[in-house]
Amino acid sequence: MKKAKKSNKPISRPEFSEIQRQANEGSATHQNQLGEILALGRFGPVNKPEAVKYFRLAAKGGDPGAIWNLARYLMDDPEGPRDDAQAMEVLSLGCDQGYPFILNQVGYFYQHGIHVGQNLEKALELYRRAAEMGYPQAQFNLGSMYCYGHGVEQNEFEAFGWIEKAAGADFDEAIRALGEFLVLGVGCLQDVDRGLELLNACVGRNNPTAMFSLGCLYENGEILGQDYAKARFYLDRAIKLGFLPAFPVMAHLLENGLGGPKDLENAKRFYQTAAQKGLPGADEAYLRFLEEHEKSGESAPAPGTDPSKKLVH
């Protein structure tokens, strides 16, 4: 679940005056709102120092939006102090008060070692607190940790249960994951038809991970039956949305002429892109491709051609 995008639309003087009045009378909600107006320049020029002053006041008053805004300023703002320790102290206020968005976000920081040392057990604890409050993204994150055994003993049945809860709240990544679980029979009775229905629903919502999943299922062929043409179709859609894991899989199909014409130019480009962007294992795949094809010159593009225009735009 994402926080609502803040508006950059200018506000009128009467609106500003009313928000300012209530903020100065001690309303934490209006203090945070005033801070956002000042930070975004919605009434006059941007005024970060004054915005931060109101964020601090609102955070002390327990406003969750202000706690998050102040922490982001402390951690990430180019004009801020880049003080992770102070930011985590601020976020701990939100955790202590049980705000699920903040619990989930701080859990994510601990899981991935962002702004704080990695601590999977702490991440699990924070995700669980938010998940038990019904926060779908935390339910999904908790389910993922159980699925992969991160910070906890692997338990696919527990993973399925949390993923199913998040999917029931229409959280898109959880719907996609639930589809995969059902197709593969992970933590549940296998139901390929229902799983495909969920995956295709996510594809209809332009979810590149679902496109990648279907592409891999058709490329692998163990469950759906091998269909390289369908694999190309779904992988191509994922690539057009910039989904990096799809690049080397599509490159393999193009390199070997599976599901369509052999295309070494685009195969090389996809391997290279994945390697340049740091996808694990992509360096080795790209070097292997070069060793096998570059010596013979068979992958060299024809003079005057632009390989980037041949498949993906």
Image (spheres, rainbow, N blue to C red):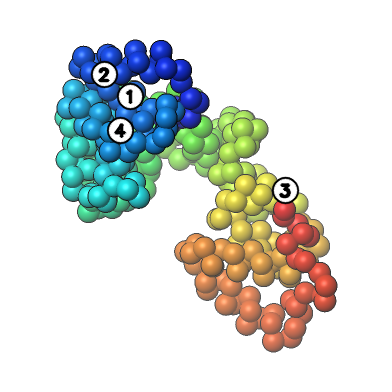
Q: Residues within 10 Å of mark 1 (few under 14, many from 20)?
A: many
The kind of residue tagged 1 is: Leu
Percent coordinates x, y for residue 275 in the rendering: 54, 67
Q: CA distance from mark 2 to mark 1?
A: 7 Å
Dot 4 lies on which element? helix
**Residue positioned 59% across, 77% down in the render:** 288
Dot 1 lies on which element? helix
Percent coordinates x, y for residue 47 in the rendering: 34, 36
Q: CA distance from mark 3 to mark 2?
A: 54 Å
**Residue positioned 52% across, 40% down in the render:** 180
Q: Residues within 10 Å of mark 3 (few under 14, many from 20)?
A: some
**Residue positioned 35% across, 26% down in the render:** 135
> Which residue is label 4 attached to?
51
Dot 3 lies on which element? helix
> Which residue is label 1 attached to?
34
Q: In the displayed image of the protein, which residue is found farthest to the bottom?
A: 295
The kind of residue tagged 2 is: Ala
- Camera-side mark, 3 or 1: 1
- Camera-side mark, 4 or 3: 4
Does residue 44 appear left or right of residue 269 in this picture? Answer: left
> Which residue is label 2 attached to?
23
Asked whether the residues under the numbered discs 2 and 1 touch, taking CB atoms below 8 Å apart as contact, a structural biologist would say yes
Mark found first going from the N terminus, 2 or 1: 2
Dot 2 lies on which element? helix
Q: Quadrant of residue 210?
A: top right
The kind of residue tagged 4 is: Ala
Asked whether the residues under the numbered discs 3 and 2 touch, taking CB atoms below 8 Å apart as contact, a structural biologist would say no
> Which residue is label 3 attached to?
233
